[in-house]
Amino acid sequence: MSEAVNARHDWTGSRAIVVGGSIGGLTAALLLRRLGFDVDVYERTPTSLDGRGGGIVLQPDTIRWFAECSTQHPEQVSTSTHYVQYLDSDNTILHRDNAPWSYTSWGTFYRALLADFGTEHYHLGEYAAGFEEDDRGVEVRFASGLRERADLVVFADGITSPSRRKISPESELEYSGYVGWRGTVLEKDVSPETFELLHDAISYSVAPHTHINVYPIPSNEGGLAVGERLLNYVWYRNVAEGHELDELMTDKRGFAAKVSLHPGAVQDRFVDEMRSAAIALLAPAAAEVVVRTEQPYLQAVYDAGTSRMAMGRVALIGDAASAARPHAAAGTAKAAANAWALFDALAEADDIADALAKWEPGQLELGQRLLQRVKAMGTRSQFDCTWTPGDPDLRFGLYAPGK
Protein backbone atom coordinates (compact mmCIF):
# COMPACT_ATOMS: atom_id res chain seq x y z
CA MET A 1 0.00 0.00 0.00
CA SER A 2 1.15 3.54 -0.64
CA GLU A 3 2.40 5.93 2.04
CA ALA A 4 -0.79 7.98 1.70
CA VAL A 5 -2.87 4.91 2.50
CA ASN A 6 -0.61 3.95 5.40
CA ALA A 7 -1.20 7.41 6.88
CA ARG A 8 -4.97 7.12 6.46
CA HIS A 9 -7.52 8.42 8.93
CA ASP A 10 -8.55 5.82 11.52
CA TRP A 11 -12.33 5.35 11.64
CA THR A 12 -12.27 2.96 14.60
CA GLY A 13 -15.43 3.40 16.65
CA SER A 14 -17.56 4.40 13.65
CA ARG A 15 -20.15 2.09 12.16
CA ALA A 16 -20.91 1.51 8.48
CA ILE A 17 -23.80 -0.35 6.88
CA VAL A 18 -23.48 -1.77 3.37
CA VAL A 19 -26.79 -2.62 1.72
CA GLY A 20 -26.24 -5.33 -0.87
CA GLY A 21 -24.07 -8.36 -0.32
CA SER A 22 -22.89 -9.02 -3.84
CA ILE A 23 -19.39 -8.42 -5.20
CA GLY A 24 -19.49 -4.63 -5.11
CA GLY A 25 -20.98 -4.56 -1.63
CA LEU A 26 -18.46 -7.02 -0.25
CA THR A 27 -15.56 -5.09 -1.77
CA ALA A 28 -16.83 -1.88 -0.16
CA ALA A 29 -17.36 -3.63 3.17
CA LEU A 30 -13.85 -5.07 3.22
CA LEU A 31 -12.29 -1.69 2.42
CA LEU A 32 -14.37 0.15 5.02
CA ARG A 33 -13.38 -2.39 7.64
CA ARG A 34 -9.76 -1.84 6.62
CA LEU A 35 -10.24 1.83 7.56
CA GLY A 36 -11.46 0.84 11.02
CA PHE A 37 -15.23 0.93 10.56
CA ASP A 38 -17.41 -1.68 12.22
CA VAL A 39 -19.21 -2.96 9.12
CA ASP A 40 -22.43 -4.93 8.67
CA VAL A 41 -23.68 -6.09 5.27
CA TYR A 42 -27.40 -6.59 4.63
CA GLU A 43 -28.45 -8.65 1.62
CA ARG A 44 -32.09 -8.89 0.53
CA THR A 45 -31.86 -12.49 -0.76
CA PRO A 46 -32.80 -14.99 1.97
CA THR A 47 -30.38 -17.70 0.80
CA SER A 48 -26.71 -17.75 -0.15
CA LEU A 49 -25.83 -16.01 -3.40
CA ASP A 50 -23.17 -18.62 -4.15
CA GLY A 51 -24.87 -20.31 -7.10
CA ARG A 52 -25.79 -17.14 -8.96
CA GLY A 53 -24.34 -15.41 -11.98
CA GLY A 54 -22.04 -16.32 -14.80
CA GLY A 55 -18.71 -14.97 -15.95
CA ILE A 56 -16.82 -11.81 -15.03
CA VAL A 57 -14.00 -10.32 -17.06
CA LEU A 58 -11.40 -9.28 -14.48
CA GLN A 59 -10.18 -5.74 -14.85
CA PRO A 60 -7.56 -4.24 -12.49
CA ASP A 61 -10.06 -2.56 -10.14
CA THR A 62 -12.06 -5.76 -9.78
CA ILE A 63 -9.10 -7.91 -8.78
CA ARG A 64 -7.28 -5.22 -6.76
CA TRP A 65 -8.48 -6.49 -3.37
CA PHE A 66 -6.83 -9.86 -4.01
CA ALA A 67 -3.73 -8.28 -5.52
CA GLU A 68 -3.09 -5.93 -2.58
CA CYS A 69 -4.99 -6.91 0.56
CA SER A 70 -5.93 -10.59 0.70
CA THR A 71 -4.07 -13.77 1.54
CA GLN A 72 -5.88 -15.20 -1.49
CA HIS A 73 -4.11 -14.31 -4.71
CA PRO A 74 -5.62 -13.41 -8.11
CA GLU A 75 -4.46 -16.62 -9.76
CA GLN A 76 -6.40 -18.62 -7.15
CA VAL A 77 -9.72 -17.14 -8.27
CA SER A 78 -9.28 -16.68 -12.01
CA THR A 79 -8.43 -18.22 -15.34
CA SER A 80 -7.13 -16.56 -18.51
CA THR A 81 -6.84 -16.62 -22.28
CA HIS A 82 -4.37 -15.14 -24.76
CA TYR A 83 -6.56 -13.97 -27.66
CA VAL A 84 -9.65 -12.05 -28.75
CA GLN A 85 -11.05 -13.52 -31.96
CA TYR A 86 -13.99 -13.24 -34.34
CA LEU A 87 -15.51 -16.31 -35.99
CA ASP A 88 -17.12 -16.53 -39.40
CA SER A 89 -20.23 -18.58 -40.21
CA ASP A 90 -18.06 -21.67 -40.85
CA ASN A 91 -15.81 -21.20 -37.74
CA THR A 92 -13.07 -19.56 -39.78
CA ILE A 93 -11.18 -17.02 -37.69
CA LEU A 94 -11.95 -13.67 -39.30
CA HIS A 95 -9.74 -11.66 -36.97
CA ARG A 96 -7.54 -12.43 -33.97
CA ASP A 97 -5.67 -10.11 -31.59
CA ASN A 98 -3.05 -11.16 -29.07
CA ALA A 99 -4.93 -9.67 -26.12
CA PRO A 100 -4.66 -11.53 -22.80
CA TRP A 101 -7.61 -11.32 -20.39
CA SER A 102 -8.42 -12.97 -17.08
CA TYR A 103 -11.84 -14.11 -15.91
CA THR A 104 -13.65 -15.50 -12.95
CA SER A 105 -17.05 -16.95 -12.28
CA TRP A 106 -19.44 -14.93 -10.17
CA GLY A 107 -19.65 -17.72 -7.59
CA THR A 108 -15.88 -18.19 -7.32
CA PHE A 109 -15.29 -14.48 -6.77
CA TYR A 110 -18.20 -14.11 -4.34
CA ARG A 111 -17.01 -17.03 -2.23
CA ALA A 112 -13.51 -15.60 -2.08
CA LEU A 113 -14.68 -12.14 -0.98
CA LEU A 114 -17.08 -13.60 1.58
CA ALA A 115 -14.30 -15.79 2.96
CA ASP A 116 -12.27 -12.64 3.62
CA PHE A 117 -15.20 -10.75 5.14
CA GLY A 118 -16.70 -13.62 7.13
CA THR A 119 -20.35 -14.38 7.85
CA GLU A 120 -20.73 -12.99 11.38
CA HIS A 121 -21.69 -9.52 10.12
CA TYR A 122 -23.24 -10.67 6.83
CA HIS A 123 -27.03 -10.76 7.11
CA LEU A 124 -29.31 -12.48 4.59
CA GLY A 125 -33.01 -11.86 4.02
CA GLU A 126 -33.04 -8.15 4.88
CA TYR A 127 -34.56 -5.79 2.29
CA ALA A 128 -33.65 -2.14 2.89
CA ALA A 129 -36.83 -0.22 2.09
CA GLY A 130 -35.79 3.31 3.12
CA PHE A 131 -33.50 5.52 5.15
CA GLU A 132 -33.39 8.85 6.97
CA GLU A 133 -30.43 10.94 8.09
CA ASP A 134 -30.26 13.19 11.13
CA ASP A 135 -27.50 14.80 13.15
CA ARG A 136 -26.77 11.48 14.88
CA GLY A 137 -26.26 9.43 11.73
CA VAL A 138 -28.36 7.44 9.25
CA GLU A 139 -31.18 5.06 10.08
CA VAL A 140 -31.95 2.30 7.59
CA ARG A 141 -35.43 0.76 7.66
CA PHE A 142 -35.85 -2.85 6.56
CA ALA A 143 -39.00 -4.59 5.35
CA SER A 144 -38.69 -7.06 8.22
CA GLY A 145 -39.20 -4.23 10.72
CA LEU A 146 -35.51 -4.05 11.60
CA ARG A 147 -34.05 -0.56 12.02
CA GLU A 148 -30.30 -0.04 12.10
CA ARG A 149 -28.23 3.10 12.61
CA ALA A 150 -24.78 3.88 11.29
CA ASP A 151 -22.40 6.76 10.69
CA LEU A 152 -22.11 5.80 7.00
CA VAL A 153 -24.43 3.86 4.70
CA VAL A 154 -23.35 2.52 1.30
CA PHE A 155 -26.03 1.23 -1.04
CA ALA A 156 -24.66 -1.46 -3.36
CA ASP A 157 -28.01 -3.12 -3.99
CA GLY A 158 -28.00 -3.27 -7.76
CA ILE A 159 -29.85 -1.86 -10.70
CA THR A 160 -33.24 -1.92 -8.95
CA SER A 161 -31.99 -0.10 -5.83
CA PRO A 162 -34.95 1.71 -4.23
CA SER A 163 -32.59 4.27 -2.74
CA ARG A 164 -31.46 5.61 -6.12
CA ARG A 165 -34.89 7.20 -6.52
CA LYS A 166 -34.54 9.06 -3.22
CA ILE A 167 -31.01 10.29 -3.88
CA SER A 168 -31.51 10.97 -7.62
CA PRO A 169 -35.30 11.31 -8.13
CA GLU A 170 -35.13 11.78 -11.90
CA SER A 171 -33.29 8.48 -12.46
CA GLU A 172 -35.21 5.88 -14.45
CA LEU A 173 -34.41 2.51 -15.98
CA GLU A 174 -34.28 2.79 -19.77
CA TYR A 175 -34.69 -0.39 -21.80
CA SER A 176 -32.01 -0.82 -24.48
CA GLY A 177 -34.15 -2.71 -26.99
CA TYR A 178 -32.46 -6.08 -26.43
CA VAL A 179 -31.84 -8.85 -23.93
CA GLY A 180 -28.79 -10.90 -23.04
CA TRP A 181 -29.13 -14.67 -23.06
CA ARG A 182 -26.57 -16.25 -20.75
CA GLY A 183 -25.38 -19.71 -19.90
CA THR A 184 -22.46 -22.02 -19.26
CA VAL A 185 -21.27 -25.43 -20.48
CA LEU A 186 -18.38 -27.52 -19.22
CA GLU A 187 -15.43 -27.47 -21.59
CA LYS A 188 -15.34 -31.26 -21.52
CA ASP A 189 -18.94 -31.43 -22.76
CA VAL A 190 -18.34 -29.73 -26.12
CA SER A 191 -16.83 -31.33 -29.20
CA PRO A 192 -13.02 -31.45 -29.49
CA GLU A 193 -13.18 -29.04 -32.44
CA THR A 194 -15.18 -26.47 -30.46
CA PHE A 195 -12.97 -26.84 -27.41
CA GLU A 196 -9.83 -26.31 -29.47
CA LEU A 197 -11.26 -23.20 -31.10
CA LEU A 198 -12.64 -21.55 -27.95
CA HIS A 199 -10.49 -22.53 -24.96
CA ASP A 200 -7.79 -19.84 -25.32
CA ALA A 201 -9.80 -16.82 -26.45
CA ILE A 202 -12.70 -14.48 -26.04
CA SER A 203 -14.61 -15.49 -29.14
CA TYR A 204 -17.18 -13.32 -30.94
CA SER A 205 -19.77 -14.32 -33.48
CA VAL A 206 -21.51 -11.36 -35.14
CA ALA A 207 -24.63 -11.45 -37.33
CA PRO A 208 -27.07 -8.72 -38.38
CA HIS A 209 -28.62 -7.15 -35.27
CA THR A 210 -27.03 -9.63 -32.87
CA HIS A 211 -23.73 -10.81 -31.44
CA ILE A 212 -22.38 -13.25 -28.86
CA ASN A 213 -19.13 -13.53 -26.93
CA VAL A 214 -17.83 -16.73 -25.35
CA TYR A 215 -14.97 -17.19 -22.88
CA PRO A 216 -13.82 -19.72 -20.24
CA ILE A 217 -14.42 -19.23 -16.52
CA PRO A 218 -13.80 -21.35 -13.40
CA SER A 219 -16.19 -24.23 -12.90
CA ASN A 220 -18.86 -24.20 -10.20
CA GLU A 221 -16.42 -26.12 -8.00
CA GLY A 222 -13.68 -23.58 -8.68
CA GLY A 223 -11.83 -25.62 -11.29
CA LEU A 224 -9.25 -23.48 -13.09
CA ALA A 225 -7.38 -25.96 -15.27
CA VAL A 226 -7.93 -25.97 -19.03
CA GLY A 227 -10.50 -28.66 -19.75
CA GLU A 228 -12.08 -28.39 -16.29
CA ARG A 229 -13.58 -24.94 -16.74
CA LEU A 230 -16.91 -23.65 -18.03
CA LEU A 231 -17.50 -21.92 -21.34
CA ASN A 232 -19.57 -18.85 -20.52
CA TYR A 233 -21.46 -16.67 -22.99
CA VAL A 234 -23.64 -13.60 -23.38
CA TRP A 235 -25.80 -13.48 -26.51
CA TYR A 236 -27.55 -10.20 -27.30
CA ARG A 237 -30.90 -10.42 -29.15
CA ASN A 238 -33.33 -7.64 -29.97
CA VAL A 239 -36.76 -7.82 -28.36
CA ALA A 240 -39.32 -5.05 -28.79
CA GLU A 241 -40.45 -3.23 -25.68
CA GLY A 242 -44.07 -3.92 -24.75
CA HIS A 243 -45.94 -7.19 -24.93
CA GLU A 244 -43.04 -9.09 -26.58
CA LEU A 245 -40.64 -8.24 -23.78
CA ASP A 246 -43.31 -8.74 -21.12
CA GLU A 247 -44.10 -12.22 -22.43
CA LEU A 248 -40.44 -13.23 -22.66
CA MET A 249 -39.77 -12.01 -19.12
CA THR A 250 -42.68 -13.96 -17.62
CA ASP A 251 -41.36 -17.07 -15.86
CA LYS A 252 -42.71 -20.60 -15.90
CA ARG A 253 -44.91 -19.86 -12.88
CA GLY A 254 -46.55 -16.91 -14.60
CA PHE A 255 -44.72 -14.19 -12.65
CA ALA A 256 -43.33 -11.24 -14.60
CA ALA A 257 -39.70 -10.22 -13.98
CA LYS A 258 -38.35 -6.75 -14.64
CA VAL A 259 -34.65 -7.41 -15.22
CA SER A 260 -33.67 -11.08 -15.04
CA LEU A 261 -34.87 -14.66 -15.13
CA HIS A 262 -32.69 -17.21 -13.34
CA PRO A 263 -31.63 -20.64 -14.68
CA GLY A 264 -34.63 -22.92 -14.92
CA ALA A 265 -37.16 -20.06 -14.89
CA VAL A 266 -37.31 -19.24 -18.63
CA GLN A 267 -40.32 -20.71 -20.43
CA ASP A 268 -39.39 -23.80 -22.45
CA ARG A 269 -40.83 -22.41 -25.70
CA PHE A 270 -38.45 -19.47 -25.57
CA VAL A 271 -35.48 -21.73 -24.83
CA ASP A 272 -36.40 -23.93 -27.81
CA GLU A 273 -36.62 -20.90 -30.11
CA MET A 274 -33.31 -19.56 -28.80
CA ARG A 275 -31.54 -22.84 -29.55
CA SER A 276 -32.94 -22.96 -33.08
CA ALA A 277 -31.91 -19.35 -33.70
CA ALA A 278 -28.38 -20.07 -32.47
CA ILE A 279 -27.92 -22.75 -35.13
CA ALA A 280 -29.25 -20.43 -37.82
CA LEU A 281 -27.38 -17.25 -36.83
CA LEU A 282 -24.14 -18.03 -35.03
CA ALA A 283 -20.79 -19.58 -35.84
CA PRO A 284 -21.10 -23.35 -35.28
CA ALA A 285 -18.78 -23.35 -32.25
CA ALA A 286 -20.76 -20.60 -30.53
CA ALA A 287 -24.04 -22.25 -31.48
CA GLU A 288 -22.88 -25.54 -29.97
CA VAL A 289 -22.19 -23.87 -26.63
CA VAL A 290 -25.65 -22.28 -26.66
CA VAL A 291 -27.47 -25.45 -27.68
CA ARG A 292 -25.69 -27.57 -25.07
CA THR A 293 -26.67 -25.20 -22.24
CA GLU A 294 -29.12 -27.11 -20.04
CA GLN A 295 -30.65 -24.10 -18.29
CA PRO A 296 -30.01 -20.82 -20.09
CA TYR A 297 -31.16 -17.65 -18.40
CA LEU A 298 -31.60 -14.08 -19.53
CA GLN A 299 -31.41 -10.45 -18.56
CA ALA A 300 -33.22 -7.55 -20.11
CA VAL A 301 -30.54 -4.95 -20.81
CA TYR A 302 -31.25 -1.61 -19.19
CA ASP A 303 -29.40 1.66 -18.73
CA ALA A 304 -29.63 3.59 -15.49
CA GLY A 305 -28.02 6.97 -15.07
CA THR A 306 -27.85 9.21 -12.04
CA SER A 307 -27.11 12.84 -11.27
CA ARG A 308 -26.12 12.12 -7.65
CA MET A 309 -24.26 9.38 -5.83
CA ALA A 310 -24.07 10.95 -2.38
CA MET A 311 -26.50 12.49 0.08
CA GLY A 312 -24.93 13.52 3.37
CA ARG A 313 -23.49 10.32 4.79
CA VAL A 314 -25.17 8.00 2.26
CA ALA A 315 -23.49 6.77 -0.94
CA LEU A 316 -24.57 4.80 -4.00
CA ILE A 317 -22.02 2.55 -5.73
CA GLY A 318 -22.01 0.15 -8.66
CA ASP A 319 -25.27 -0.53 -10.48
CA ALA A 320 -27.18 1.07 -7.62
CA ALA A 321 -25.76 4.37 -8.88
CA SER A 322 -25.60 3.85 -12.65
CA ALA A 323 -25.92 0.63 -14.61
CA ALA A 324 -24.05 0.23 -17.89
CA ARG A 325 -24.67 -2.38 -20.55
CA PRO A 326 -22.17 -5.26 -20.39
CA HIS A 327 -20.38 -4.53 -23.70
CA ALA A 328 -17.30 -3.04 -22.01
CA ALA A 329 -17.25 -5.82 -19.38
CA ALA A 330 -16.90 -3.05 -16.80
CA GLY A 331 -19.90 -3.24 -14.46
CA THR A 332 -18.11 -5.12 -11.70
CA ALA A 333 -14.97 -3.04 -12.23
CA LYS A 334 -16.97 0.18 -11.85
CA ALA A 335 -18.43 -1.00 -8.55
CA ALA A 336 -14.94 -1.87 -7.29
CA ALA A 337 -13.56 1.45 -8.55
CA ASN A 338 -16.33 3.30 -6.70
CA ALA A 339 -15.41 1.40 -3.51
CA TRP A 340 -11.67 2.05 -3.83
CA ALA A 341 -12.23 5.75 -4.50
CA LEU A 342 -14.49 5.90 -1.42
CA PHE A 343 -11.74 4.23 0.57
CA ASP A 344 -9.26 6.87 -0.57
CA ALA A 345 -11.65 9.75 0.17
CA LEU A 346 -12.39 8.53 3.68
CA ALA A 347 -8.71 7.81 4.31
CA GLU A 348 -7.93 11.47 3.68
CA ALA A 349 -10.83 13.02 5.62
CA ASP A 350 -12.13 13.22 9.16
CA ASP A 351 -15.73 14.00 8.18
CA ILE A 352 -17.87 11.46 6.31
CA ALA A 353 -20.14 13.94 4.51
CA ASP A 354 -17.15 15.98 3.37
CA ALA A 355 -15.42 12.84 2.11
CA LEU A 356 -18.50 11.78 0.13
CA ALA A 357 -18.89 15.25 -1.36
CA LYS A 358 -15.30 15.13 -2.64
CA TRP A 359 -15.69 11.53 -3.83
CA GLU A 360 -18.89 12.04 -5.80
CA PRO A 361 -17.90 14.19 -8.85
CA GLY A 362 -15.20 11.86 -10.15
CA GLN A 363 -17.40 8.80 -9.73
CA LEU A 364 -20.31 10.47 -11.50
CA GLU A 365 -18.03 11.30 -14.41
CA LEU A 366 -16.71 7.73 -14.53
CA GLY A 367 -20.23 6.31 -14.70
CA GLN A 368 -21.42 8.81 -17.30
CA ARG A 369 -18.44 8.17 -19.60
CA LEU A 370 -18.93 4.42 -19.39
CA LEU A 371 -22.66 4.71 -20.02
CA GLN A 372 -22.13 6.80 -23.16
CA ARG A 373 -19.57 4.35 -24.50
CA VAL A 374 -21.60 1.17 -24.01
CA LYS A 375 -24.72 2.78 -25.47
CA ALA A 376 -22.71 3.52 -28.61
CA MET A 377 -21.37 -0.05 -28.66
CA GLY A 378 -24.86 -1.49 -28.32
CA THR A 379 -26.19 0.70 -31.12
CA ARG A 380 -23.41 -0.51 -33.41
CA SER A 381 -24.04 -4.20 -32.73
CA GLN A 382 -27.81 -4.40 -32.40
CA PHE A 383 -29.18 -1.68 -34.67
CA ASP A 384 -26.65 -0.09 -37.05
CA CYS A 385 -24.79 -3.33 -37.79
CA THR A 386 -21.43 -1.54 -37.78
CA TRP A 387 -19.74 -3.78 -35.16
CA THR A 388 -16.61 -4.73 -37.11
CA PRO A 389 -13.97 -7.29 -36.08
CA GLY A 390 -10.82 -5.76 -34.69
CA ASP A 391 -12.19 -2.23 -34.18
CA PRO A 392 -10.21 -0.92 -31.17
CA ASP A 393 -13.22 1.13 -30.01
CA LEU A 394 -15.00 -2.14 -29.20
CA ARG A 395 -12.46 -3.41 -26.68
CA PHE A 396 -13.33 -4.09 -23.07
CA GLY A 397 -12.31 -1.49 -20.49
CA LEU A 398 -13.66 0.61 -17.63
CA TYR A 399 -11.88 3.89 -18.36
CA ALA A 400 -11.53 3.61 -22.14
CA PRO A 401 -11.34 0.83 -24.74
CA GLY A 402 -8.58 -1.52 -23.61
CA LYS A 403 -8.04 0.34 -20.31
Image (tube, rainbow, N blue to C red):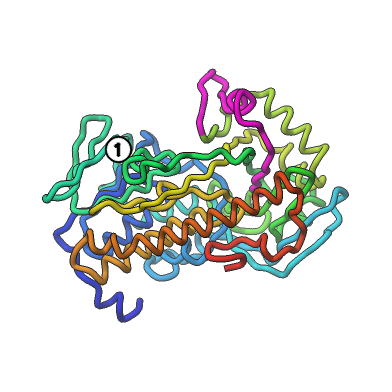
Quadrant in the picture for the C terminus: bottom right
Numbered disc 1: secondary structure: strand
In the image, which residues are magenta? 231-258
Tell whether 34 sits left or right of 220: left
Residue 198 position by quadrant: bottom right
Name above or below for residue 318 compared with residue 62.
above
Query: Residue 159 appears at what percent x and percent y?
Result: 45, 42
Q: Farthest residue toward the front? A: 170
Residue 281 position by quadrant: top right
Can residue 114 be seen in this snapshot?
A: no
Query: Residue 9 appears at what percent x and percent y?
Result: 21, 71
Tell whether 120 sits left or right of 259: left
Residue 29 position by quadrant: bottom left
Can residue 355 be seen in this snapshot?
A: yes
Per the image, the residue denoted by label 1 is 128
Name above or below for residue 159 compared with residue 115.
above
Count of residue discs: 1
- Give whichever of 75, 152 is nearer the camera: 152
Q: Farthest residue toward the bottom? A: 3
Examine the structure image and report whether residue 257 is included in the region drawn in magenta: yes
Tell whether 369 sits left or right of 32: right
- Give whichever of 44, 337 is nearer the camera: 337
